[in-house]
Amino acid sequence: MHRRRLLSVGLSAATAPFLKGSRASAAPPASGPTDAEALAEFSAYARAIYPVQRPARAAPPPPQTDFQVRRDRPKQLILGLGFEIQSDGIASGNAGLDDSETGAPHDLVPEERERLYREMLRGFRFCRLAGGLYLRGTDEAKRQLRPRWPTQFTELHEMFARAGIDGASFEYWSPLPYWKANAQLAGTVSPMKGRDPLNVLRCFGPAFDQDPIYRGDRKRFLADFAAACRQDLVTLRDAGVPVRFWNLQNEPIVSSLYSSCTYSYADYVEAFLAVAPQIKGLDPRISVIADTSLDYEFRHIKPVLDNPAPAGLVDALAIHRIGVDSMEVVRRRGPAGKPIINNEFEYLGGPASPARCLNTVQSIMNWFQRADSPTWFWLHALKPYLNAEASGYSLGFWRPQSQSAPSRDAAFPGMRPGHWVWNTYNWNAVGGFVRRLPWNSRSLSVDEATADDDLRIMAFARPDGRLVVVVSNRCGAPHTFRIATDSGRRFRGFRYTPDDAGRDCLGVAIGTKSAPELSVTVPDAAWEFWEEI
């Protein structure tokens, strides 16, 4: 999501043939969502965004709480964390595309690239790639993905290899221009001025029956589109960028002046059913994720999940609960029992702050502990330091090499072109999990005597079997967590605060404690990892 504006919705009324006679009678209207529905959804979502300053509690916290880690009730595999890379340009404030050759790691001088890979990206498992936005180069016909400058894909391959990233999560912000009704990546109408009926897939646009190539043949068009989507992944794979997740469309209700494409519910289903089998056929190890809207109804993909035949095409459901209060993440599974992935987290308005740092920590914990999610994604590793949205969006800031004049921002004195610095509050929140949550750890159930949204816990077993318990406190006072671990080992603790994550974001060592009952008193606005030794 890249917006601070209201949503615009492009509508069309195709009906997926498979719906006839299926169990999808309770599916949403084929033409939805309406403008009013989308705006209401966004308004409800916006109210959940966590403020820059921590709100006061409605009631005083308890002095201590009791928990029981249940090793006998293992849960989902936690694959690892992800991030997104801004590998091409976007205008400040997301006010359109930047056509200059700018992006990360492209803009960084060689030593700063290596520092990025070593100090920040090491430990992340997945990198989200925005097709049609930050990967928007095309062939001459504008139908297939290509590097927008000669070294773009080589730079991405270097980043994956040097940082040890397992694979990409690729999804389209917009199909490439050949496949669009407006023949371009972005919408042409400001979201504040209404919908853009041309910011849709070409076969769902007006007058498709007069299309000079397809002449209204949607089946033929979608077959060609599916083959092109498959080929884009082959192109990335051949460039040394392996793909682990794929998604048809980021936020299919959103139209914007940067890369975007809207789908009605039925249009999304029809396109998905055409393309997803091609992706599965290319590599069955690629996880197909779907929907990526703002709420838990999953209206775009639900008709597929309501039909047993195609439901197996969907491996997980993607949702955007961006910058929201961590308390709203509760235990749930999606329709048809599919796991849910929050594959983008940042703060849309206002800067990073200590309060938001702690909220991000608890969001990560709750997605893994309460919502049983297999992964979690922060938005951008780096943002250009002068972009208005950069503070809420990034783990660090970079200065493009094109900006050779002295820095004009007092917050970045002496920052040189091609160099980057930390965005401390965002990085400290995410970095501890990157460093101390190994890939393929196993989430464990935790019984809570009294659940409190400001006093959170997470437990997992590392691949070597050692137990790790994470506790966080935003209640406004020191708090004692009494945790029954069913362990005969000792535990070593590491403390984090918004301002101090220790060397290499490994936390500050705070000693050892005995088990089986682990009793730890955590200061306000702090979180701790306690690891079995």
Image (cartoon, rainbow, N blue to C red):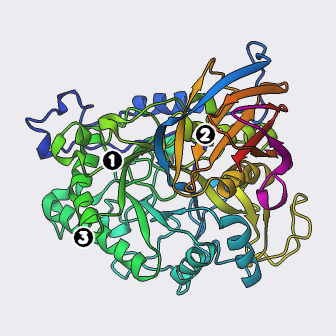
Q: Is residue 183 above or below residue 158?
A: above
Q: Which residues are magenta?
A: 498-519
Q: Is residue 430 magenta?
A: no
What is the C-alpha distance between the residues marked 2 and 3?
43 Å
Judging depth in this view, the residue of 391 and 516 nearest the camera is 516
Say which residue appears at 52% left-offset and 29% top-offset: 330
The numbered mark, 1 or 2, whose residue comes first in the sequence reads 1
Q: Is residue 518 magenta?
A: yes
What is the C-alpha distance between the residues marked 1 and 3?
19 Å
Say which residue appears at 85% left-offset and 50% top-offset: 508
Mark 1 against mark 3, which lies toward the viewer?
A: 3
What is the C-alpha distance between the residues marked 1 and 2?
39 Å
Confirm whether residue 192 shows in the render. Answer: yes
Give coordinates of residue 382: x percent, y percent: 68, 63
In the drawing, does residue 59 fall left or right of residue 143?
right
Q: Residue 227 — which label?
A: 3
Q: Which residue is mark 2?
A: 459
Q: Which residue is mark 1?
A: 263
**What secondary structure is marked by label 3?**
helix
Mark 2 against mark 3, which lies toward the viewer?
A: 2
Q: Quadrant of residue 276?
A: bottom left
Q: Is residue 429 above or below residue 522?
A: below
* Number of dots carrying numbers: 3
Q: Name the kind of residue labelled 2 in the image.
A: Ala
Say which residue appears at 80% left-offset and 52% top-offset: 507
Q: Name the kind of residue labelled 3 in the image.
A: Ala
Mark 1 against mark 2, which lies toward the viewer?
A: 2
Q: Is residue 478 above or below residue 272?
A: above
The numbered mark, 2 or 3, whose residue comes first in the sequence reads 3
Which residue occupies the extreme top position in the image?
59
